[in-house]
Amino acid sequence: MHVDSSPRVERSHTRRLSAEFVESWRDSHPETNIVYRDIGRNPIPHVTEEWIGAAFTPTNQRTSAQLDTLALSDRLVDELLEADVYVMGIPMYNFGVSSGFKAYIDQIVRIGRTFLFEPQDPGAIYKPLLTGKTLYVITASGDSGYEPGGVNARINHLAPYLHTVFQFIGVTDISVISVGSDEFGGERLQDSLARARKAIAEISAR
Ligand SMILES: Cc1cc2nc3c(=O)[nH]c(=O)nc-3n(C[C@H](O)[C@H](O)[C@H](O)COP(=O)(O)O)c2cc1C
């Protein structure tokens, strides 16, 4: 499953690199069936009071209005359940994910569909429902040094957040490919792009 979330089109690094990832993956895994979702150009709505009420109503008690309210969320969850490998282009906005990507997260972290809440089991109150998935995140930032050990690692709320939320629903095999220095351009940006492309080539050749 291929997801883009940058609102930028031609100038987006995450969009360009996620497309290159898919192209290079397809070269080495020609049998792959790819599903594409562009939440940068087709934003996902925020959850509403009706949505929350519907999501927390047991499936067999939902009204037809509640089923309609959850239709998009159900489709997004189905896409996640059906795919084995995810590649997601996720720009850094204000040290975390964009509000557009967060709206997507709120639609896919679904009680009874991607996790279970079982307060009677003190050993595991929350149980993830996804298994065997692999997530490749392609992120881009204006500055650099957000990688572990880097000068800006402490203020990187994107990669740690993505690990937390995807692990919560059961996606534990997560790799992050980063492009930094978009605001600086020049050699710094070119070096960073070259490192990201090398990582993409290595992953898709596996
Ligand atoms: C609203 C907004 C917030 C941003 N916040 C950050 C930030 O917190 N840290 C950073 O290094 N770059 C930040 N940037 C720069 C983007 O991360 C950078 O331009 C990146 O390349 C965007 O991804 P894209 O090329 O796929 O569109 C921000 C850009 C925008 C438009």
Image: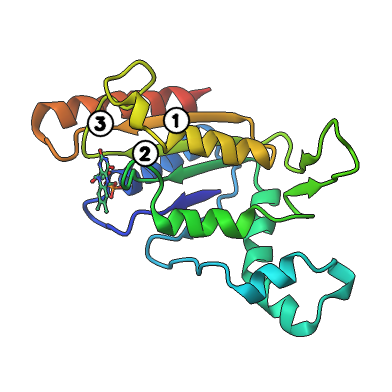
* Amino acid type assigned to the residue bearing label 1 in the image: Val
Q: Residues within 10 Å of mark 3 (few under 14, many from 20)?
A: many
Distance (Cα) linking label 3 and label 2: 11 Å
Q: Quick one: SS at disc 3?
A: helix
Q: Nearer the viewer, mark 3 or mark 2?
A: 2
Asked if labels 3 and 1 touch by Cβ distance under 8 angstroms, the answer is no
The residue wearing badge 3 is 193
Q: Nearer the viewer, mark 1 or mark 3?
A: 1
Q: Earlier in the sequence, mark 1 or mark 3?
A: 1
Q: Is residue 197 left or right of residue 57?
A: left
Q: Residues within 10 Å of mark 1 (few under 14, many from 20)?
A: some
Distance (Cα) linking label 2 and label 1: 7 Å
The image quadrant that residue 58 belongs to is bottom right
Q: Residues within 10 Å of mark 2 (few under 14, many from 20)?
A: many
Q: Is residue 8 left or right of residue 75?
A: left
Distance (Cα) linking label 1 and label 3: 14 Å
* Amino acid type assigned to the residue bearing label 3 in the image: Leu
Which residue shows up at 34% across the image and 32% down it?
155
Q: Exactly how many numbered labels are in the figure? A: 3
Q: Quick one: SS at disc 2?
A: strand
Task: Tell me: residue 185, above or below residue 72.
Answer: above
Which residue shows up at 32% across the image and 27% down it?
146
Q: Nearer the viewer, residue 35 or 123?
A: 123
Disc on res. 176: 1
Disc on res. 139: 2
Asked if labels 2 and 3 touch by Cβ distance under 8 angstroms, the answer is no
Q: Earlier in the sequence, mark 2 or mark 1?
A: 2
Disc on res. 127: none
Asked if labels 1 and 2 touch by Cβ distance under 8 angstroms, the answer is yes
Q: Is mark 2 within 8 Å of ligand 1?
A: yes
Q: Nearer the viewer, residue 184 or 120?
A: 120
Q: Quick one: SS at disc 1?
A: strand
